[in-house]
């Protein structure tokens, strides 16, 4: 069973309802590994210094903001903590608005609020009141390390917590050249409008999400299944431990991890001079080893000749005895 992200309270007015915050989505994407086409070995991304090309351990990495090209201000742990929200386990509803007033572009990610033990009464009371009034609760919630704006709304037997985007995160449509004005400005006739309405009515139906599925994923899964059966796969890849934060560093949010992955993907490779030195090193060792072997062989030759001579001298003496 899925684990709650946190367990706390849903608060509106003086009423507090114990709840658990559960993820409301399930990722079903197919995940691929990147391999070297030459030997089918997995590609590993590392954290490297952009100038030296050397790998940098997590303990030596700090967070910084680039306020100008090539100019950074480094953030200390205390700076980040001072900006972090204090309440991590409360959904405090600040106001109630009509559900129809919220632009769909604001909705980002769903979570489920599950009532705690003996908290069903307050849970059902809020759920049904929201349903009957057509209202949505607007609140703030902390998910992991970031504070989000959210909407609490009823959905069948559940209270859904929907993460909302802030206005600053939306692109203003006026930034683009979009057609505005009346239909007549675009020579759209009443007959064309009537036909368009008729077409929409003929295609109208009830919203049934079960009728839709990811056909691309299904077809791709079929291709993979056939490849595995026909070829037995292409190679065996040993699982590698996923990169993770060092225990001494702060926990970061998903956006930070994603940015680090992008930075790692754009890293500057090590200088070619370094590669040449690494390649020449084994050759020098091999030369020394060859010299030692040659010295041992040359030293062994006189010893063998001396042994043969002594054996010849000893042979007549044994016969005479």
Image (cartoon, grey):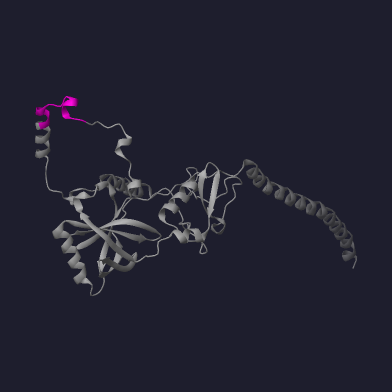
In the image, 98 versus 316, the foreground residue is: 98
Q: Does residue 192 show up magenta in the picture?
A: yes
Q: Is residue 278 left or right of residue 20?
A: right
Residue for point 34% across, 56% down:
148
- Expressed as whole percent of the image width and height from the top left, the position of residue 290 reads 74, 49
In the image, 255 versus 172, the foreground residue is: 172
Can residue 126 be seen from the camera position used here?
yes
Quarter of the image where one finds residue 91: bottom left
Q: Is residue 110 left or right of residue 316?
A: left
Q: Main secondary structure of the magenta part?
A: helix
In the image, 70 versus 133, the foreground residue is: 133
Q: Residue furthest top?
A: 187
Label count reads 0
Can residue 236 be seen from the camera position used here?
no
The vertical placement of 189 against 33, above or below, is above
Q: Is residue 45 left or right of residue 27?
A: right
- Expressed as whole percent of the image width and height from the top left, the position of residue 101 reads 21, 49
Residue for point 13% across, 60% down:
132
Q: Residue furthest bottom?
A: 118
Q: Is residue 158 left or right of residue 42?
A: left
Q: Quadrant of the C terminus?
A: bottom right
- Expressed as whole percent of the image width and height from the top left, the position of residue 183 reads 16, 29
The magenta region covers 181-193
Q: Quadrant of the N terminus?
A: bottom left
Quarter of the image where one finds residue 23: bottom left
- Expressed as whole percent of the image width and height from the top left, the position of residue 302 reads 85, 54
Residue for point 69% across, 46% down:
283
Q: Does residue 276 show up magenta in the picture?
A: no
């Amino acid at each position: 069973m899925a684990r709650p992200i946190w367990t706390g309270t849903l608060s509106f007015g003086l009423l507090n309802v114990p709840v658990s915050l559960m993820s409301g989505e399930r990722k079903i994407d197919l995940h691929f590994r990147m391999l070297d086409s030459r030997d089918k070995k997995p590609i590993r991304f590392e954290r490297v210094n952009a100038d030296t090309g050397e790998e940098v351990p997590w303990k030596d990495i700090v967070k910084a903001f680039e306020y100008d090209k090539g100019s950074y201000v480094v953030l200390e742990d205390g700076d980040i903590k001072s900006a972090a929200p204090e309440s991590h386990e409360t959904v405090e509803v600040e106001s109630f608005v009509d559900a129809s007033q919220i632009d769909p572009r604001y909705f980002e990610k769903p979570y489920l609020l599950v009532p705690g033990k003996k908290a069903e009464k307050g849970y059902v009371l809020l759920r049904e009141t929201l349903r009957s009034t057509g209202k949505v609760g607007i609140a703030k919630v902390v998910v992991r390390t970031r504070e989000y704006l959210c909407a609490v709304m009823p959905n069948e037997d559940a209270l859904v917590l929907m993460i909302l985007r802030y206005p600053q995160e939306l692109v203003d449509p006026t930034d683009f050249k979009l057609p505005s004005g009346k239909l007549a400005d675009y020579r759209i006739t009443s007959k064309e409008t009537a036909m368009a309405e008729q077409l929409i009515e003929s295609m109208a139906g009830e919203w049934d999400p079960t009728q839709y599925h990811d056909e691309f994923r299904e077809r791709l899964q079929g291709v993979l299944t056939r490849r595995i059966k026909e070829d037995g796969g292409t190679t065996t890849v040993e699982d590698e431990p996923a990169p993770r934060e060092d225990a001494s560093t702060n926990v970061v949010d998903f956006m930070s991890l994603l940015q680090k992955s992008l930075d790692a993907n754009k890293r500057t490779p090590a200088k070619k001079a370094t590669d040449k030195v690494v390649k020449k090193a084994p050759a020098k060792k091999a030369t020394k080893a060859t010299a030692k072997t040659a010295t041992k062989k040359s030293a062994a030759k006189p010893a063998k000749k001396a042994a043969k001579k002594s054996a010849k001298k000893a042979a007549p003496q044994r016969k005479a005895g």
